[in-house]
Amino acid sequence: MTDPATDTAELVAALRVATGPVDLSAIATDATPGFDADKEAGEAALLSLGDELSELQERLFAEGKSGGARSLLLVLQGMDTSGKGGTLRSTVGLMDPQGVRITSFKAPSEEERSHDFLWRITNALPSPGYVGVFDRSHYEDVLIARVRELAPAEEIERRYQAINEFEADLVSKGTRVVKCMLHISADEQKERLLARLDDPTKYWKYNPGDVDERQLWPAYQEAYEIAIERTHTEVAPWHVIPADRKWYRNLAIGELLLVGLQAMALEWPAADFDVAVEEQRLVDEDPIG
Amino acid sequence: MTDPATDTAELVAALRVATGPVDLSAIATDATPGFDADKEAGEAALLSLGDELSELQERLFAEGKSGGARSLLLVLQGMDTSGKGGTLRSTVGLMDPQGVRITSFKAPSEEERSHDFLWRITNALPSPGYVGVFDRSHYEDVLIARVRELAPAEEIERRYQAINEFEADLVSKGTRVVKCMLHISADEQKERLLARLDDPTKYWKYNPGDVDERQLWPAYQEAYEIAIERTHTEVAPWHVIPADRKWYRNLAIGELLLVGLQAMALEWPAADFDVAVEEQRLVDEDPIG
């Protein structure tokens, strides 16, 4: 059940980007649209989503086991430290791990680079009934690839349309696509990187290369703006999640998942067998005696 | 922290099978070895493991991100309704989904059948730092394959040794292997199948074919006994989990996971960079201002 402090319609409307040019600098990274209470209440609101989220996900899983083709794909993108991992733990972790498949995309391997950029993505798509989660995704191929010039400009240009066609095809085959850009400020990133340096249990999350990428912050913001504008479609819209507040980020993505699953009108599959006959078989045919 | 009602050493010792012939009929399916309290206390004891389990798993994940090669593989086997799915939800779900990879093995596809039976298993092994979970596994290839004669007898015979060599190799490369057979009684299975028929939200879990398999209960028990005896090794031992009580099954597997991770002596990786230098870089090299 949704918490009373949450206005889901307002939240969804505020997070979904408008069609046309995107100006990330105009979207506050520390706002909490659609939620009118504090951190403690926000954390409680997320947990209160858990039961419905979990039940709807189980219905989707059940549908997949019963011949259905539908699935859901959550795409998480964002700068380093924006909270993709925390979202996996706190929000995705509310669902039964049995029905969730997470894929973390790293720099492509040699084999992956020998194929089209969507090859490894296709291989990681959720099977029927599953909630697939991409921690980074095909969008890296128009983000870091653009900023670091890892591909020729005309290839980057080609990819926006290729992504739109790919996602439209996915949706037409029954996958609901929920795309989220975790939007933090450069100052917040600095605080989070410094916090990692201040805690030996977090050293492993720190990579000096992250500071090199950080120097390109404006170029990344621009690459995001272009990518979001070019791939924000009716069937696979983008959401920009104010992510300076971790609790709001977790709650907002939980709400988007819940709304996405609700829109699928998931029902428990009917029996494709005769219940009475099966009951009788179980009683009659006892292998032990 | 382990609950006071839990005697971990007793639990582990009781669940680990002895070397030599295995007699499943001599192992009570409703016992709770190593835990001296009721269901409510058992559920609380499982939750009280969560923090340590989760922290050790994060240390393993951190190690993997920092160049370590180690991982853990939990193998879940058991008859239909024995609770593999429930274990995923209740026990595996205590860990951060970011570091867990679950693979559910179904009847092999045509492509999988064209390869050796360990091909698809090799493809699903956990990457460094991950906890991999197999919901069914290569053991199906000596269980249903034996009972249903899906392969010639000499091929089944070959597979026990092939499994031992495969697992020994895995362990030598840094994967800790935790093998659990979820042991329920035929009566408990009947109750669980009848319960699925009594609840329309559970019809999807019911398959009339399960009753056909159930008719072969004694043959399956024998196949398990042989498989466990032949593949119970020092490096990759088998545990038989009394699984009629779901709460005990969840707790016992949680304890085995915890003990397994504890034995790996996991430490937070040291910084492979100069902390002070990085702090200074973050302060000096500000891309925004």
Image (tube, coloured by chain):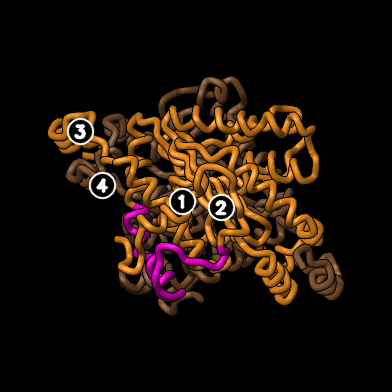
Chain colours: A orange, B brown
Q: Are marks 4 and 2 in contact (CB under 8 Å)?
A: no
Q: Nearer the viewer, mark 1 or mark 4?
A: 1
Q: Are marks 1 and 4 on the same chain?
A: no
On the picture, is B163 further left or further right than B2? Answer: right
Q: Quadrant of residue B166?
A: top right
Mark 1, secondary structure of its residue: helix
Mark 4, secondary structure of its residue: helix
Give neighbour class at mark 3: few <14, some 14-19, many 20+ (Cα, 10 Å).
Answer: few
User: Magenta segment range?
Assistant: A28-54
At 35% across and 29% down in the image, what residue appears? Answer: A67
Give above or below for A138 relative to B234.
Answer: above
Q: Are marks 1 and 2 in contact (CB under 8 Å)?
A: yes
Q: What is the number of the mark on residue B192?
A: 4
Mark 2, secondary structure of its residue: strand
- The residue carrying mark 3 is A285
- Residue A49 magenta-highlighted: yes
- The residue carrying mark 2 is B100
- Pinpoint the chain carrying mark 2: B
User: Residue A227 appears at what percent x and percent y?
Assistant: 63, 42
Q: CA distance from mark 2 to mark 3?
A: 39 Å
User: Residue B272 appears at what percent x and percent y?
Assistant: 83, 65
Q: Residue furthest bottom?
A: B4
Q: CA distance from mark 4 to mark 2?
A: 28 Å
